Amino acid sequence: MERNRCADLLRVGAIGAVALGHWLLTSVTYQGGHLSGHNALVYVGWGRWLTLLLQVMPVFFVVGGYANALSWTAHHQRGQTWTDWVRGRTLRLLWPTTVYVVVAVLAVTTARIAGADAAGLARAGWLAALHLWFLPVYLLLIALTPLLLAAHRRWGPMVPAVMAVGAAAVDAAVLGRHLPLLGFGNYLLVWGTMHQWGFAWQDGTLTRPRRRCRVLAATGTVLLAALLTWGPFPVDMIGVGMRVGNTTPPSIALLAFAAAQTGLLLAAEPALARLLARPSWWRLVSRLNRTVMTVYLWHMVPVIIVAVAFYFYPTGLMPQPTIGSAQWWALRAAWIGLLAVVLVPLTVIVMWMQRPLLLLPSGPGVAGWWSPALLPCGLAAAGSALARLAIGGFAPGGHLPAVVLAVYAGGLLAALFSVRPPSQDTAVGFRSAPE
């Protein structure tokens, strides 16, 4: 089957928007001997409207649903089992993530030996880990893909519709009944709904006829406008540090926003396909697509490097105007330029470092009855550890989270030992960009 070039373009554009958004809204300060970072949205009220352009995580889940549906269908037709397929997809994410985690642990250890300030180290460790929240959610959706895809093929649009109603019910329970623990259900219901849209994109039920995309966009726009006007939800589609937010946990307002965004992007697919028919554009997108996973994992590292090099005493090269002032906005271009200059060679180096992982064998154990049980245990352990890292960072209180790291290592080992039967492929490896 011919590769969907539009899906690759959306993935590349989304990772660019993620990096740009995080860089734009991160403001570094050095005062009283302490290096710190601030979320500019806290200080620039109107900047919350920018999140309507910068919130692109729904694109990753829609494209992920498309890719997972295509991949599982092809592998299942060749006789591959759930364990084989999920394990392969999981390791493609966990190997590059493990490289990132190991480097982060080494960096924290080195900083502690060098006598780094505990508060500053904790802040940097949190900044370097906050984006890892995506991985446990996506790993869960990978594990559920065969079941959810079967539901899609039987009930079609009723599945995301029911999930959306469930998400609204969870919001009502969290906000109306003050049952915050129920909010965790929306990580599956909200992001999972977008993943289901990816299934519908892949088999054409969302894009043939094309007016269905416009209906999705119009429905999402109307619902979002109503929720922002009469509901308790803020316009901020990131929602960090707010009493009522849209992402922690994800809300029905975020889902409405995602519907509008997805509908508009898929309605533009024919125009994007014509653009990508040009060989020069497709070569560029194809090359960039291979870097997506690396850029996602490492794009906040340049923030730490540039902060230390240009803000920290004794250099102090970068001025520190008031956040939101005209001078602060003018300096954003220089700030983003410096980060890009650091990120490009960093990405090249990391991808070179990861190349030997492509040659790793399928696993150190022997396939057996335990394989289907061991893989879910590994997924649960690795996913929960990544979630804890996203919340607490790599250096909570200035110290390594030893227990969390041990749980992650155990999850990775469990996934490794849930080996494929010897008759299957003998290498797993990974690609730089998840498909």
Image (tube, rainbow, N blue to C red):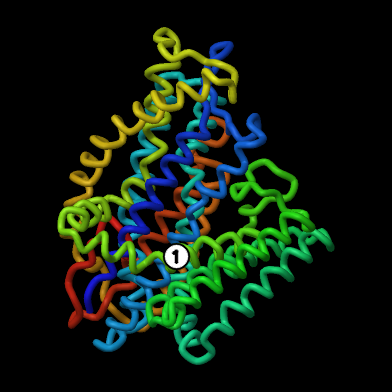
Depth order, front residue of 231/311:
231
Q: Is residue 416 left or right of residue 169?
A: left
Q: Is residue 349 above or below residue 3?
A: above
Q: Is residue 216 left or right of residue 374?
A: right
Depth order, front residue of 2/93:
2
Which amino acid type is marked by label 1?
Answer: Leu
Q: Is residue 76 left or right of residue 335?
A: left
Residue in the picture at 63% in, 43% down: 240
Residue in the picture at 44% in, 76% down: 210
Depth order, front residue of 421/42:
42
Residue in the picture at 30% in, 57% down: 433
* Quadrant of the frame with the N terminus: bottom left
Q: Percent x, y for residue 140?
A: 48, 68
Q: Is residue 239 above or below residue 269?
A: above
Residue in the picture at 52% in, 18% down: 327
Q: Percent x, y for residue 336?
A: 39, 30
Q: Percent x, y for residue 7?
A: 34, 65
Residue 272 falls in which quadrant of the image? bottom left
Q: Which residue is mark 1?
A: 139
Name the secondary structure under disc 1.
helix
* Quadrant of the frame with the C terminus: bottom left
Residue at the limit of the structure toward the top, as seen here: 314
Asked if residue 403 can be seen in this view, the reply is no
Residue at the limit of the structure toward the bottom, as seen here: 154
How many numbered markers are drawn?
1
**How many neighbours does mark 1 have within 10 angstroms: few (below 14), some (14-19), or many (20 or more)?**
many
Asked if residue 339 can be seen in this view, the reply is yes
Q: Percent x, y for residue 283?
A: 17, 55
